Amino acid sequence: MYLYDELGTALFEAITLLPEYGLTRAEERLLRRHAGDMLEHLPPPVAVVELGSGSGRKTRWILEALADREPVAYFPIDISAAALIKCHQELGNVGAISIVGLEKSYLEGLQEAATRRRSNQALLVLFLGSTIGNFDPPAAEKFLRDIRRHLKPGDALLLGADVKKSVHDMLLAYDDPAGVTAAFNRNLLARINRELGGDFILRYFEHHVRYQEMDCRIEMHLRSTRRQTVSIRAADFTCVFREGETIWTEACHKFRVEEIPGIARRTGFLCEAQWIDTEWAFVENLLIAD
């Protein structure tokens, strides 16, 4: 979460446009082509809640398809105020939609949105972008169970999941030649310096990406290029880094299409349908609360 201050959010939006990062375009293709099919599984009326909305660009396809049949209440949830402002700008022109942005964590926002729904209204929760892959597998299943606890039977979760592909393509997606992802990663240190009184020297840390085959996981690290001592004043913390030692900043687990229904069953859902992009292996999963 600490990666996403205002600059981090802007850098991530830039990452989604990079040619090496096919994930976002794959999901947009699926939503553009199949939004109507997805909504056929959900009888009206439906309120839409999006966990980690960002700019909401991909969500347009779902909201427009839904607005064609009924007025839509949309609750984007994000910890970034800048992202919520951009979301309003991006989606404010969609007809028959009311937008209530919630600057909260995922579950706090979901809890509030669930209390605002009408008594006869189902919830469609969107958790897109393969953000579920940022959790390790046990934590991912716990998080899905936590989502389920806020839902009623028949509510739905649309879960985007990036699928395992060639190691070359996966590494390139997180280590682009233009250095945008590197800037996104280093911005974490800049934020610690600014907000917590850290004294990281950013040029002494390099962006490093690796793939862990056993766990089917991409890892982003910041690797110290020399022996150095760093302090964070607000945490009363000092650390000595050896040359080559890393700070592990993010994990991105990749999935197999066939494992999603089992994950759904173990967390209180049924996998109603799946849509798969063939240009960049990615799967959109419609899970129904059991």
Image (spheres, helix red, strand yellow):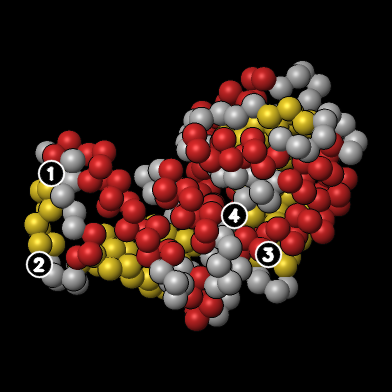
Residue 227 badge: 2
Q: Is residue 280 above or below residue 269?
A: below
The CA span between labels 1 and 3 is: 42 Å
Looking at the image, tell me whether mark 1 or mark 3 is earlier in sequence order. Answer: 3
Residue 106 horizontal/vertical position (percent)? 52, 36
Name the residue at 25% across, 42% down: 194
Residue 146 is at least partly visible in this image: no
Q: Disc 1, disc 3: CB below 8 Å? A: no
The CA span between labels 2 and 4 is: 37 Å
To which residue does mark 4 refer? 129
Name the residue at 73% across, 73% down: 278
To which residue does mark 1 refer? 237
Element assignment for label 1: strand
Instruction: Name which residue type carries label 3.
Output: Ala
The CA span between labels 2 and 3 is: 41 Å
Residue 120 horizontal/vertical position (percent)? 81, 21
To which residue does mark 3 refer? 26
The CA span between labels 2 and 1 is: 17 Å
Q: Disc 1, disc 4: CB below 8 Å? A: no
